[in-house]
Amino acid sequence: MFRLWKRYLLLAATAGGLAYGSQHYQLDGWQHLRLHPVTQTPMAAPAVGWDFGTSGVPNSSHAMNPAEVVRNTKQLIPVWKNSSLRTALAGKPDASTKSVADPRIRVASFNLHAFNETKLRKAPVTETLARIIRQFDVVAIQHISSRQNDILPLLVDRINMSDRRFEYMRGPRVGTDGQKQQFAFLFDTDRIETDRDQLYTVDDPQSLMDYDPLVGWFRAKQVNPERAFTFTLVNIRFDPIYSSKQRELLPRLVRSIRQDGRIEDDVLLLGDFGCSSKELQNVTGLSMVHAIDDIATTVSGESMLDNILIPTRSTDEFTGRAGVIDFLRQLNLSYDQAMQVSSHLPVWAEFSAFEGGFAK
């Protein structure tokens, strides 16, 4: 019944022109939200290729499959309302969900670790990033440090030199002076749709967080819109030094976002939390389960920093499948080559494209 009311109210909001989009709201613990419309300017793509001859690195014709590049996964044991609909978490995920008709979507988070012009000019780095991102349907990107506005379009152009058709939504530069960064969402337009007018950052006038989170709303396209899974993604990055204080703000952040006018209960937090799954689990009042449990998410294999947090009471669409892409070992890169891509490994979780998770 709640799902039906949710769809009705969402359609009513759409018919009304989404009037909340241009307003500010008093939220629990936060002053207001501000919206940042995004436009994309097509740019030329950089050169192609990662072929070091005898280095063992695959050339540009190699298509990476998530079944080949998962480091490790563990059985998740959350208490789900429809636990009978959950698929058991296998050691490796199925093949890429790139088929338009596939009733699943794969959501990912990737800290690109100071993504700038230097990285973009390295064709092997750009090609590797493109191969990784193509394995997902929507990806939350953190730590874009370039001052140029064309860096993300160039990366998307490289990704689209394939059978995938991605677009991007980018937030404003946030953070303290000298540490300004941008967050973004990349998504496959054949499988995911969004409303760009609903992209916003959470304003933090008291500077409680180092970086204002970027929030976007999405819907799966593989099924009828009335039955499609809709969800909000909250793109987050915490500095590990200050993570202990900032992660305690997460319950307030979630409550605030749920009051933004969307009538959306599936609010997923994802990004670089600067801490382990155990530390996230200990946050009082968060009521979320972590998709990645006790697995290193850095190239060095020494730290767990990245994760995807899923509401325990509302998101029945989570299939229970999640993982970490270890591109260093699976692409046979040297440590230096992998660090040129990023010091972080991407994390992902799989969801049903149907609202309520009734299709497997």
Image: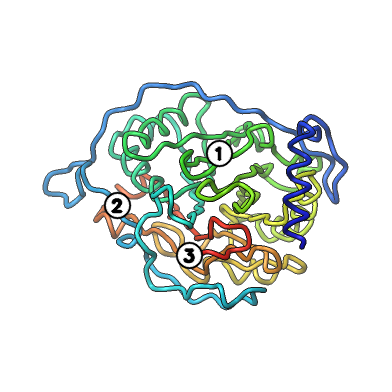
Quarter of the view holding residue 95: bottom left
Residue assigned mark 2? 64
Kind of element beneath mark 2: loop
Which tag is nearer the camera, tag 1 or tag 3? Answer: 3
Inter-mark Cα distance, 1 to 3: 21 Å
Left or right: where 36 falls relative to 110: right
Judged from this view, the residue extending furthest toward the left is 54
Inter-mark Cα distance, 1 to 2: 23 Å
Inter-mark Cα distance, 3 to 2: 17 Å
Q: Residues within 10 Å of mark 3 (few under 14, many from 20)?
A: many
Q: Which is more toward the observer, 211 or 66?
A: 66
User: Is 350 situated above or below 59?
Assistant: below
Task: Report the colour scheme.
Answer: rainbow
Which residue corresponds to the image point at 65% horizontal and 28% vertical from the top-left? 37
Kind of element beneath mark 1: strand
Quarter of the view holding residue 34: top right
Residue assigned mark 1? 184
Q: Could you tell which of marks 1 and 3 lies nearer the N-terminus?
A: 1
Q: Residues within 10 Å of mark 1 (few under 14, many from 20)?
A: many
Q: Amino acid at mark 3?
A: Ala
Q: Which is more toward the observer, 90 or 223?
A: 223
Q: Amino acid at mark 2?
A: Met
* Mark sitting on residue 246: none
Q: Amino acid at mark 1?
A: Ala
